[in-house]
Amino acid sequence: MKHPLDLFPYPQDPASKPIDPQTADGLYVYVRDGTGILWVLPDGAHRHPKVLGQARPAMYAGDLTVADGKIRDVTNLSGTFQFDDEEGLREMAGELQRQGLQLDAGAVRFFPADGSPPVVLQ
C-alpha cells in the first residue's frame, strides 16, 4: 500500500466507479484500493487523488485505455502514487482479466522511474 504524495483530503469524485466489462470506451486513471477493487475515473489533470478520495492509500495506480470494450493500454503512470514495480502492474493486468476484461497484446506497458523507455510486459 502506498499513500498519495498529495495528502489533501479531496472528496471521492462522483464519476469514480469500479471497472467492469461494461465500462465505456475512453481514457481513464485507475487506483486499486486496499480491498482489491480497481476504481476508474475519466482521465484529466490531477485525477488520481480523487479516484478514492480522502488521501486513501492504494495497492497500485496508473492509467488505462478502453476501446471497443477491450483494454488497449494499461500503465503505471501516476504522478500522485508513482508505483515503480513491474510485478504490481502484472498483477493489475491479471486482476483486469479476472474481472472479465480482455487485454490487447502489448497493452501492459511499464514506465521505469528513471525515464528510460517503457517495457511491454504483456
Image: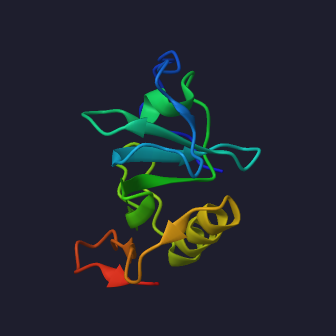
Dividing the picture into quadrants, the one containing residue 82 is: bottom left
Dividing the picture into quadrants, the one containing residue 80 is: top left
What residue lies at 68% left-to-right and 45% top-to-bottom? 37
User: Residue 11: in sight, yes or no?
Assistant: yes
What residue lies at 57% left-to-right and 21% top-to-bottom? 54
Q: How far across and how far down the image is residue 34, in percent? A: 72, 44
User: Residue 5: in sight, yes or no?
Assistant: no
Q: How is the image coloured?
A: rainbow
Q: How far across and how far down the image is residue 69, in percent? A: 44, 57
Left or right for 82, reference 100: left
Residue 11 or 84: which is nearer the viewer? 11
Left or right for 16, reference 32: left
Residue 115 or 87: which is nearer the viewer? 87
Q: How far across and how far down the image is residue 72, in percent? A: 36, 67
Residue 74 or 69: which is nearer the viewer? 69
Q: Furthest-right residue in view?
A: 35
What residue lies at 56% left-to-right and 30% top-to-bottom? 52
Left or right for 12, reference 108: right
What residue lies at 49% left-to-right and 44% top-to-bottom? 23
Q: How far across and how far down the image is residue 114, in percent? A: 28, 73
* Tally of numbered discs: 0
Look at the picture and state if 98 lies above or below 20: below
Residue 44 or 77: which is nearer the viewer? 44
